[in-house]
Amino acid sequence: MENGRCKRMIAMIRKFLELAGERKKQFYLAWLFQALTSICEGAIYFMLFLAIKDILGGSFTREKLIQYSLMFLVYTVLHFVFYYFTIAKQRPVSYAMMRDERLSIAAKIKQFPLYYFTKDKISQLTSLFTTDLSFVEMNIMEIIAGFVSSMIMTVVFALMLLSVDWRMALLLFVGIIPGYILYQQFQKSMVQLGEQKKNAQVAMIDSTLEYVQGMETIKAYRLEQTGKLVENQVDGYCTASGRYESTLTNWSMGYKICLNLGLFLSLGVGITMVRSGSLASATYLFFAIMGIIFYRPLEALMGSFAMMNLANASLDNIAEINNLPTENEKQGITQFADTQADVRFENVSFSYDGKREAVSHVSFSANPGTITALVGPSGSGKSTLLNLILGFVTPKNGRILLNGKDAATLKHSDLVRHVSIVFQEVYLFQDTMMNNIRMGNQSATDEQVIEAAKKAHCHEFIEKLPQGYQTVISEGGASLSGGERQRVAIARAILKDSPIILLDEALSSLDAENAVAIQKGIEEMIKGKTVFLVSHTLSYIQNADQILVLSDGVLQGCGKHDELLQSVPLYKTMWEKEKSIKSWKL
């Protein structure tokens, strides 16, 4: 009956042991104690049968009372001792193992390519940390322990019943046949419902994250229907969970009824056997008691296998994250320690999905002390070019050279250390202002951090904070304005002092005062550096040493502002539109 289920359970145990690593020996020991616990419990029931047999046979003496009492005491004490060691071994190890797994996954996530972190992937990661890891931590040891205990108890009880009276034992086993048939149908539906429940949970987390992140827009436009979407997803998860639990309850009840058919049959036939004198009354009474007890581990197995489906899904999700390739696995081993860097693209192409090319056959070069501006419509490949320079993604075709060295052969840590980037959306961590700037150079002194802040023109507003540089800012830097966060990011880049600087829309959506301060900070930061600047505002970059015009990943032209106005129609159109917008008045 249990063959198919046992295979799936054993497969799940193997996944768990792979996750456990060096701690698997401690789990083996815990399961050994679990087996001994179950054997002691079976021995107690066998002593009960012998006592009943002697009582009904009239041979129960004072000496046997003492003997049985001592044996009951010994097996009971051993049962609790083994049970204690089972719990003491498995639970602390389980918590320690999942602690290490959380830290391991958190460390690995840092090595994933940036394009991995799409909206649906973030929801999956959130579900992994809040649900899958917690489920494995809190439940899988109980699932495996229950499986081990139930299997051993079933075997011990079956052998014991067969040794007492094989006829009654076989009658008792009859209920297993319809139970097995019912389980085959149960298994298929529960796997499907478990998958639906998991998908509904991810969708609920996704909509909740979107709802919280978009609260400013929701309030501004009174988007009541957005809350309705969250409500629908929560209802969907509740419905999926309710369907899973109700189906499990119905199948479990049917399973229990099927199993107990054997009990009813054995008791009915047993009465006839007692009356005919072919079965002793003590044996019949023992089977009446053990008939109820025998099915308990089989019923517990039903619960273990139901939970196994959810545990398997969680283990698969954890394994999927652990098996994802990281950036470091695709990088070389050549060291790079140059203090200046010229950058050259040679026929570089890249695609995120393997179909549409985000960058197609792009070639150009940029020298130290120059500014290269990247312009073009949204989705033209500007940010992808920056990610290629950073090594966050690697070319499908062509190559990128730094001082003549192929970037694909360089150590990833060296490559990242030689590039600084200021994003349009700056993220600050819930830490002191001092530590947020020091992220640009972990070994920098307080004096160096303050000097970088002065060059980035953020020293003045930092000094006005309640605790100055020791002020702990809110998560994401929400307590600061966009311009203030931008200046902190520039201070990080100045402190890092990398030969290559990437500015991704660093001046967009800023007021005039912040824009002037940030421009001064940028001027201080880019002296003698190889600078790449992404901007939708052409007036900011018209004095760049060279401007790359991109459209649909293709380089339309490269040159100075005046040259491009004559040679690249797209650039001329963008410039004329910008001028018309600036001349617009109410």
Image (tube, rainbow, N blue to C red):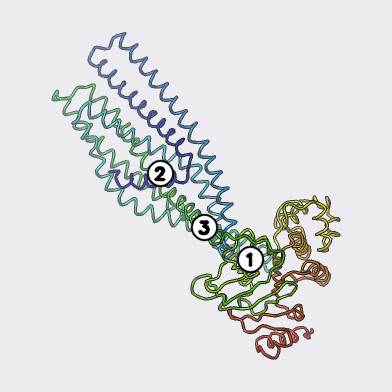
Q: Is residue 130 left or right of residue 581?
A: left
Locate residue 550: give its quadrant.
Answer: bottom right
Residue ID at (63%, 70%)? 404
Amino acid type indicated by mark 3:
Val
Q: Which residue is mark 2?
A: 13
Locate residue 298: give its quadrant.
Answer: top left
Q: Which residue is mark 3?
A: 202
**Which of the image's four quarters has the N terminus?**
top left
Foreground pick, 401 / 574: 401
**Picture coordinates of residue 514, whole percent (x, y):** 81, 68
SS at badge 3:
helix
Foreground pick, 388 / 137: 388
SS at badge 2:
helix
Q: Which residue is mark 1?
A: 390
Residue ID at (61%, 81%)? 555
**Picture coordinates of residue 202, whole percent (x, y):** 52, 57
Q: Is residue 38 left or right of residue 477?
A: left
Foreground pick, 76 / 100: 100
- Dots 1 and 2: beta carbons under 8 Å? no
Residue ID at (51%, 37%)? 93
For marks 2 and 3, the one nearer the N-term is: 2
SS at badge 1:
helix
- The correct choice, above or below, for 277 with respect to 531 in the image is above
Q: Residues within 10 Å of mark 1 (few under 14, many from 20)?
A: many
Locate residue 429: give its quadrant.
Answer: bottom right
- The correct choice, above or below, for 436 with respect to 359 in the image is above
Residue ID at (35%, 39%)? 299
**Which of the image's four quarters has the C terminus?**
bottom right
What's the distance in space between the residues labelled 1 and 2, CA to CA? 41 Å
Q: Which residue is at the far top?
A: 62
Q: Nearer the viewer, mark 1 or mark 2?
A: 1
For marks 1 and 2, the one nearer the N-term is: 2
